[in-house]
Amino acid sequence: MKRFVAGSLARGLISRGGYMSTAEMMARPASMQRVMMNKQQSQRYYYWSRMMSSVAEKSTEVGNGGGVEAIKEEEKQKIEKNGDEEKGMVNSYWGLSRPSIKRPDGTDWPWNCFMPWDSYEADLSIDLTKHHVPKKFLDKFAYRTVKLLRIPTDLFFKRRYGCRAMMLETVAAVPGMVGGMLLHLRSLRKFQQSGGWIKALLEEAENERMHLMTMVELVQPKWYERLLVLTVQGVFFNGFFAVYLLSPKLAHRIVGYLEEEAIHSYTEYLKDIDSGAIENVPAPAIAIDYWKLPKDATLKDVIIVIRADEAHHRDVNHFAADIQFQGKELREAPAPLGYH
C-alpha cells in the first residue's frame, strides 16, 4: 500500500514537470545528456525521499490515532493472559475459558466441580422413617439382597462411620449413572423422549458424587480401602448394569432399599457425633458452598443434609419401581427433576 501511494505521488510529480522527456534529452549533445541524466536522477531521489518520509509520517499518524485502541486492547489481552497463567488457569486456543464467577460476598468462586447455581438448601423436613414394605417376589428379593450386602460392610467397618460413608458413596453414585446411561441409549434407539428421567437419574449420580467429594475431605482413605473401592465399584457396576438390563423395576427397588440403609447408617453416624465418640469438626468448605450452609457449620450439619439427600433418593427410586410395577414406562410419569 505504501509503495502504491509513493508511486502514485511520484508519477504525479513527474507529470507536473521538472523532468525532460526522452526525445528532448536525445536532441542535446552527449556530454549534456549525461549531465541532464545525473541531474534528473538527483531530482528523482530528492522527491522520492520526500514522498517516503511523508508516507511514513502518515502511517505513524494513523497508528497513533485510529490504531491506538487496537494496540491498547492487545496489551490488555497480554496482561490478562499473564494474569491467568499466574493463577494457574489454562489458556485455550479455542477461546474457551470460565467466566469470572463470584460468591454472594464478592469473593472468587473456588470450585470447578460445581457452580453457584448447582448449590441448594437441603429439604430437612422430609420423612426419614418411610419404608417400602416388600410384598411381591421381586420386592422381597431386592430387600433380602440389600440386607445380605450389609453383613460384610458391618463386619469390615464396624462403627467407623466415616470410612463406611466413603465406601457407601462410591457405590451409591453408580446406579444413577447406569440408569441414566441406559435410558439415554433407549431414547436414541426408539426415538422417544424420556420424560425427564435421564436428567433426574444423572442428577442423583452427581449428588452422590458430591457426597463422596465431601467425605474424602473428612476421611483420608488408606491404601487398602482404596483397593477395596476399586474392587467393589468394578463388581457392583457390572452387576447393577446386568440387573438394569434384565429388570429396571428390580434395579430401582434395590436402590430404594440401599438408600434406606444409607439413612440408617447416617443416623448412627449422628449418634456417635452426639455422644462424643466422633469429633464434631468444622464442615469442609466444599460442603458449605454446595449445601449453602452457614460459615460456622460443623460435621453434624453436613451429615444431616447428606441424610436428607439419601431420603430423597429413596423416594425417587421407589417411585420409579412403582411406576414399572404398574406396567408403565418411566417416560409416562413426570420425573422429579431437582429433587435431591
Image (cartoon, rainbow, N blue to C red):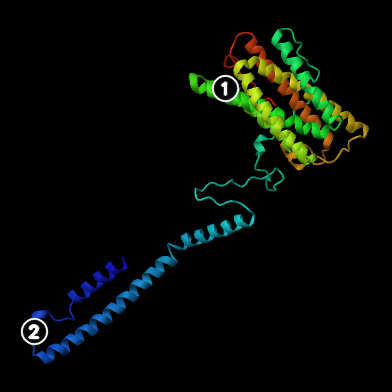
Residue 132 circle label: none
Find residue 322 and report its horizontal and vertical position in percent. 67, 12
Spot the residue most to the right.
Answer: 275
Relative to the observer, which residue lies in front, 327 or 29?
Answer: 327
Name the outermost residue toward the bottom. Answer: 31
Indicate the quadrant containing the N terminus: top left, top right, bottom left or bottom right.
bottom left
Q: Quadrant of residue 152?
A: top right
Which residue lies at the image location 71% right of the left edge and 18% below the top edge? Answer: 254
Name the image quarter holding residue 215: top right
- 99 lies above or below 130: below
Q: Residues within 10 Å of mark 2 (few under 14, many from 20)?
A: few
Q: Secondary structure at mark 2?
A: helix
Whichever of labels 2 and 1 marks the residue nearer the N terminus, that label is 2
How many dots with numbers? 2
Residue placed most toward the observer, 305 or 51: 305
Residue 149 percent across, percent down from the top left: 77, 22
**Residue 32 at x, y = what percent?**
12, 91
Instruction: Note whether 92 is above or below 253 in the view shown.
Output: below
Question: Which SS class for mark 1?
Answer: helix
- Residue 37 visible to an observer of this rendering: yes
For disc 1, the marked residue is 183
Q: Look at label 1 and name its amino acid.
A: Leu
Q: Residue at (64%, 54%) from the top-left corner? A: 87
Q: Which mark is residue 26?
A: 2
Amino acid type at image mark 2: Met
- Asked whether the beta carbons under mark 2 and mark 1 sit within 8 Å of each other, the answer is no
Q: Residue at x 80, y 31 (%)?
A: 164
Query: In the image, residue 220 lies at what x, y percent?
Result: 79, 41
